[in-house]
Image (cartoon, rainbow, N blue to C red):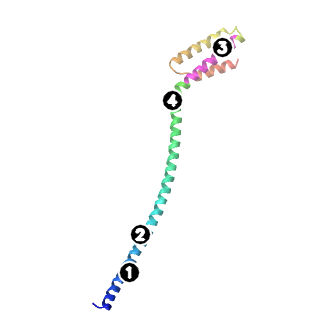
């Protein structure tokens, strides 16, 4: 082989090498663009996920709040009714004391109030309070 043939083969090889390098560079550029697009989509999805998580946490918080309120409403009737019963009994006893202090001549009304007090004690045993009856009774006392 002569020098010119060797140079020509090296030149052909170098041209093929440069062509292959340019093709690889184009593929690399396309892959980098693809990576940037995927990173942009990923950040967008992360933002949406974060937003969704925040909304989900807020909804969970609201639901927990509502459920705790419902539980407190459902669990307190026995304690609330016993408190109401105690308050009603104290009020009736105060009214009885006031009536007996104001006049001793209304023994009939005192007896009826005592009967109602006894009825309330019976209502306590069944955990039921007739609030309407108590209200009308107290309104009747206020009219005097």
Q: Which residue is mark 2?
A: 31
For the C terminus, give its image quadrant. top right
Give residue 95's position: percent from left, percent from top. Answer: 66, 16
Disc 2 or disc 1, which is closer to the eye? 1
In magenta segment, residue 91: yes
- In this orientation, which residue lies closer to the viewer: 76 or 97? 76
Q: Where 7 falls versus 80 (above or below)?
A: below
In magenta, the rendered stretch is 81-100
Q: Which residue is mark 1?
A: 18
- In this orientation, which residue lies closer to the viewer: 58 or 117? 58
Instruction: Using the image, tell me which numbered label, if any, was put on residue 97.
Output: none
* Label 2 vs 3, first from the N-terminus: 2
Q: Residue furthest right?
A: 102
The CA span between labels 3 and 4 is 33 Å
Disc 2 or disc 4, which is closer to the eye? 2
Instruction: Using the image, tell me which numbered label, if any, was put on residue 96.
Output: 3
Element type at mark 2: helix
* Label 1 vs 4, first from the N-terminus: 1
Q: Which residue is mark 4?
A: 75
The CA span between labels 1 and 4 is 82 Å
């Amino acid at each position: 082989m002569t020098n010119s043939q060797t140079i020509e083969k090296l030149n052909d090889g170098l041209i093929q090498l440069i062509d292959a390098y340019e093709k690889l560079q184009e593929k690399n550029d396309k892959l980098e663009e693809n990576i940037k697009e995927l990173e942009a989509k990923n950040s967008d999805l992360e933002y949406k996920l974060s937003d969704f998580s925040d909304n989900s946490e807020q909804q969970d918080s609201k639901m927990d709040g509502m459920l705790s309120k419902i539980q407190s409403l459902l669990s307190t009737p026995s304690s609330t009714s016993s408190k109401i019963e105690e308050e009603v009994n104290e009020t009736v006893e105060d009214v009885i004391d006031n009536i007996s202090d104001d006049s001793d001549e209304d023994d009939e009304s005192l007896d009826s109030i005592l009967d109602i007090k006894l009825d309330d004690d019976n209502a306590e045993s069944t955990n039921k309070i007739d609030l309407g009856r108590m209200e009308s009774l107290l309104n009747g006392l206020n009219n005097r």
